[in-house]
Amino acid sequence: MSEQLIESPIDSKIKFQSTDYRIDDGRLLITASPQLAADRKRRFLQGQSRKVVATPDIFFWSEWITRLANRDDTLPIPLTRMQELLLWEKIIRNDLESKSVSHHISLKGLAKRAAGAYASMRDYSIDTVELALGGEESEALARWIRALKSEMDRGEFEGRTLAANIPELLIPRLPNIPLPEHIVLDGFESITPIQQQLLDTLQQQGCSIFTSQSDQISTTPTLTPCQSAASELTHLALRIKKLLDQNLSARIAILTSDSFTDSKALRRELDRILMPESLTDPFCDKQSVSTEAEPLSDWPMIQQILHLLSLTGSRSIPLTDFSMLLFSPWLDGFDTERLERAALDATLRQQNHHHISLTRLLAGSRLDGLPALRGITATLAELESSSRAASHWVKAVHTLLQALGILQAGLDHQSLRSDAEIRQM
């Protein structure tokens, strides 16, 4: 599918090749998403005859805004994503506690939603007062925004700002910032008001703005009825296999709606149809489809490590948590003590222990004959969990993982049978 630059509401029409954006000629390509930016960079580099070329000027929108802001020393420094979410979480927690509201829902989830809602408000120039009389959720968001602004006016983040505020603060400063001669917008289905204001200002400064658009697909889409979700995935995989049999170098994209959430089932079916060898090799790391990677926290090894970190500094832990520790294959001495650890777990369950006091466990005789487990238990109980600098926590966690035997296991651990597990370690 070829592409061209089409006339935008701001500037005139110009043609270009899809693999050459002429970015070396004072032209900057801005995409609507980081994934599209990565694809455009790949396609640009594939179109070059030289083996070594300069990194092309291709950025997704928010990345480009950050680069522009960094050129102006007078702009306040925005909070990092983690700082912002922690601040939202603090504000929301204080608000719920002041109203004596029990919060069984995730504060982290609320913080992410609040941050996203505020960013959308800034994109569309919606003032906080417009949230009034919008219902309980809108009024809560308005309270949180006011509290957050107050916190940033007098708290430890005084003088800082949120990333969502940067475009609005940046617009009046654009005349003092070096700008590209031409900008190509790619993948933008629509332009928000704040983006339009910024682009208008750029044009006033002599910058030409163009938009790219793919040629219309000549074939007519068809619908195929399927009896179930599973049969739909099978049909999709077989259809892709047929296309690849016709052209092995074809690049195929699968588009799904927001209601489609089971991407793992899709990957499994594609692997089954396109890579049957994966059925006989359980440690095959290859995938027949390239999708967004699963979060590290979803991998068993990382889950167990995070679980261990959550137990540090505890004097008493639930039996279910201690049981997970007993059956973790990554801990020191598991290969030689696994039977004894399993017997200890069975004994504790038979005696109806709901919580395990690590101090009593270390002082008693239950860990006799389990020297590695005794050392692990003592290390978890003794780690100081008080507040400390992030750099100190990094060293403390690294030392802890070494003491628990996880890092020593390294690449020699018998359970490391696949490239994926090696990369995780």
Image (spheres, grey):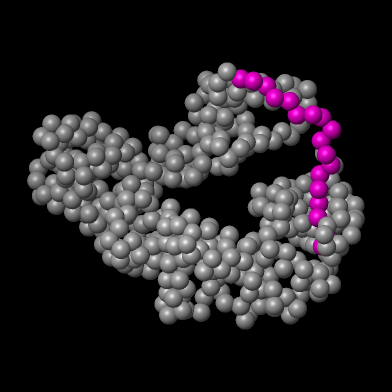
Residue at the spot 32% in from the left edge and 39% down from the top edge: 328
152 in magenta: no
- Is any part of residue 163 visible from this angle? no
Q: Nearer the viewer, residue 369 or 154?
A: 154
Viewed as shown, does residue 327 lie left or right of 348?
right
19 vs 281, nearest the viewer:
19
Residue 107, by quadrant, is bottom left
x and y percentages locating residue 131 in the rendered image: 51, 63
Identity of the residue drawn at 34% across and 66% down: 94
Q: Give coordinates of residue 399: x percent, y percent.
A: 34, 57
Q: Is residue 223 left or right of residue 292?
A: right
Q: Is residue 211 magenta?
A: yes
Q: Quadrant of residue 218?
A: top right
Tell me the magenta residue range.
Answer: 209-226
Relative image position of residue 16 (x, y in whole percent): 88, 51
Residue lying at the far front in this picture: please name it. Answer: 133
Instruction: Relative to 247, say whether 152 is above or below.
Output: below
Q: Residue at 26% of width from left, 43% of height from top?
A: 321
153 up-or-down from 212: above or below: below
x then y, percent, for residue 14: 90, 55
* Front residue of 50 and 256: 256
Residue at the spot 49% in from the left edge and 45% down from the top edge: 295
- Depth check, front residue: 299 or 212: 212
Q: Is residue 19 left or right of residue 132?
A: right
In the displayed structure, 399 sits above or below 225; it is: below
